Image: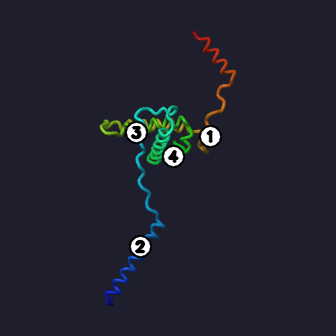
Amino acid sequence: MDIAPVERMELLELLKKQQKVLELLAERLEPAAPAAPERPAAPAPGPIDWQAVTGEERRRLLRGLADFVDGLVHHYRLQLAILPCWWRHADAIEELSALWQVRQETFKAGVRPGAAMSWQDTLYKARDRTANILSSCREGHVEAVLPLWMNDGIKAELDAFIAGQR
């Protein structure tokens, strides 16, 4: 079957248009694969004092910590140890941010090769401590801080004890 040059050009143009339509349909049906997650931001160079850090610095550190924890949970399959409400527990934030800093130090340039095994040991100790912190939240978040820890009578006894010390 011979195709005239004019018809050939028209068919090629039609095929190009149809190809574009097919590509658009494919994009809608199969969204592009998500971009690889970025490495979490580096934590502060020294221990993070969560009681002192505020404002933009606190938000930056919490975002970096959240990214680190998300990657950690998925990489090491820690969904049963680190529960989604970890960020609601100050002690879990402290534990996980310390782990974050250990990881940063372990994998920076010039660190001895054995540091990676030390990281693994630290990771599993932190996993167990974090799981313990979050153990009350197996069926959903449970606020672990009681509204009243020490009543006024016990505070008065403590004050008298302190005052009586030599």
Furthest residue in direction right, as rendered: 153
Q: Nearer the viewer, residue 98 or 124?
A: 98
Task: Give the number of the disc on residue 79.
Answer: 4
Mark 3 — residue?
103
x then y, percent, for residue 137? 59, 41
Please name the amino acid that badge 4 sits on. Gln
First along the sequence among labels 1 and 3: 3
x then y, percent, for residue 47? 44, 32
Residue 45 is drawn in which quadrant?
Answer: top left
Secondary structure of the residue carrying tag 1 is: loop
First along the sequence among labels 2 and 4: 2
Residue at 37 percent of width and 80 percent of height: 13
On screen, residue 12 versus residue 161, left or right, reads: left
x then y, percent, for residue 111? 32, 36
Q: Label 1, label 2: how many angstroms apart (C-alpha)?
A: 53 Å
Image quarter hosting the C terminus = top right
Mark whose residue sits in front, 1 or 4: 1
Residue 103 is drawn in which quadrant?
Answer: top left
Please name the amino acid that badge 2 sits on. Lys
